[in-house]
Image: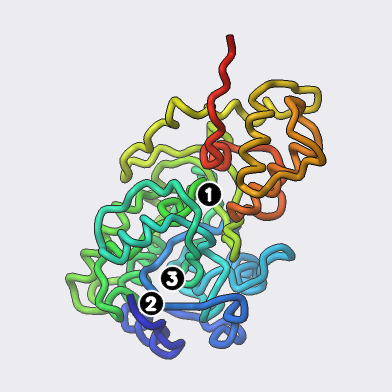
Amino acid sequence: MAEPLTAAQVLKALRDEGLTVHEVRSWRRHNRNTKGPWGPLNGVMIHHTVTEGVEPSVNLCYDGRSDLPGPLCHGVIDKAGEIHLVGWGRANHAGLGDADVLRAVIRESTLPADDQADTDGNSRFYGFECINLGDGKDPWPEAQKDAIARAAAAICRAHGWTERSVIGHKEWQPGKIDPRGFTMSGMRARIAERLRAPAGAGDRATGSDTGAGTGTGAGKATGDGGAGREPAPEDVPARPDRPPEPPAPSAYEPFPGAAFFQDGRSDPVITVMGHRLNAEGCGRYRQAPTPDWNQAARRSYTAWQKKLGFRGRDADGIPGRVSWDLLRVPRVSRR
């Protein structure tokens, strides 16, 4: 746990680590500090952009979107391994995540599964967005992966942290699966190796398009509310560097699939879902919930998604596996 580095301190730390750093516009004063605290800081979070091209990616991370103002991170790491600083202070990158994960980062211990979205990560993590489409085909050049390790090591070195203070977005917030294309355990091993050597030691990688790795899904920058697409079941990634998450308890209804929730559907599970939404303060029903999938049920589910931190089209009222499992709908008896 530490006070945030100053803009001058992080700039020096990154350059001392042997990185090429570009200062973008008014990055030193560009932040979301009026929306909440920034600090104390506990770690570094790695993301991918789901974009291509340096200029559009950097501009997006600086400016943000209509539904998610920038900065969307502190630095953008391009495929050549160069860093573009786009903000300093609170940034819309981490969103709501798991308090148990934060405690593990603070202790620098093994990470638990991220199954809650109850803690503000924008105040507690430095964030780096790495330019990659996140489609499992876009390669990760060695120069880019080397730069990720160097950038994270620079901040860890400045604070006296180990590599266990560095996590991926997928390890923080349920439903997030970035960065896609390499394991975070492998990246932490790179960071540990860098921390064992003096700052800036070793030649910079020059960047063949190798080491694309494997994985599934895609991620986005995340706002104060924790926006992010709820993945369909087939998008949920295998995490070779994480233990498998336990199955949903048998006392709860398993996720029936997004296609279940369509006009004309009538099922007792929708009634029980409605009662759970009411219990969570998200009910938007004029009367009691019914077994019919209708606009009242959809508005209520939208309120639940927003409570979890989803925004925009990610809070469209159609249940996804992440929000459904967190709602814990009691199993319906079907005799």
Amino acid under label 2?
Leu
Q: Position of residue 95 (x, y in %)?
A: 54, 61
Relative to 319, does residue 113 appear above or below in the rendering? below
Query: Residue at 67% across / 25% down in the picture?
Result: 260
Secondary structure found at label 3? loop
- Judge depth for marks 2 and 3 and give the one in front: 3
Q: Residue under circle 3? A: 124
Q: Position of residue 160 (x, y in %)?
A: 25, 77
Query: Residue at 71% across / 49% down in the picture?
Result: 313
Q: Is residue 196 visible?
A: yes
User: Quick one: which residue is furthest to the front in this view?
Assistant: 287
Q: Is residue 235 visible?
A: no
Q: Residue under circle 1? A: 134
- Report how far apart the C-alphas of labels 2 and 1 lie in the structure: 24 Å
- Label annotation for residue 19: 2
Mark closest to the chain's N terminus, 2 or 3? 2
158 or 213, which is in the foreground? 158
Secondary structure found at label 2? loop
In this image, 3 relative to 283: left or right? left
Query: Residue at 60% across / 73% down in the picture?
Result: 71
- Judge depth for marks 1 and 3 and give the one in front: 3
The answer to whether the residue labelled 1 contacts the one labelled 3, judged by CB atoms less than 8 Å apart, is no
Residue 108 occupies quadrant: bottom left
Q: Position of residue 126 (x, y in %)?
A: 44, 71
Mark closest to the chain's N terminus, 2 or 1? 2
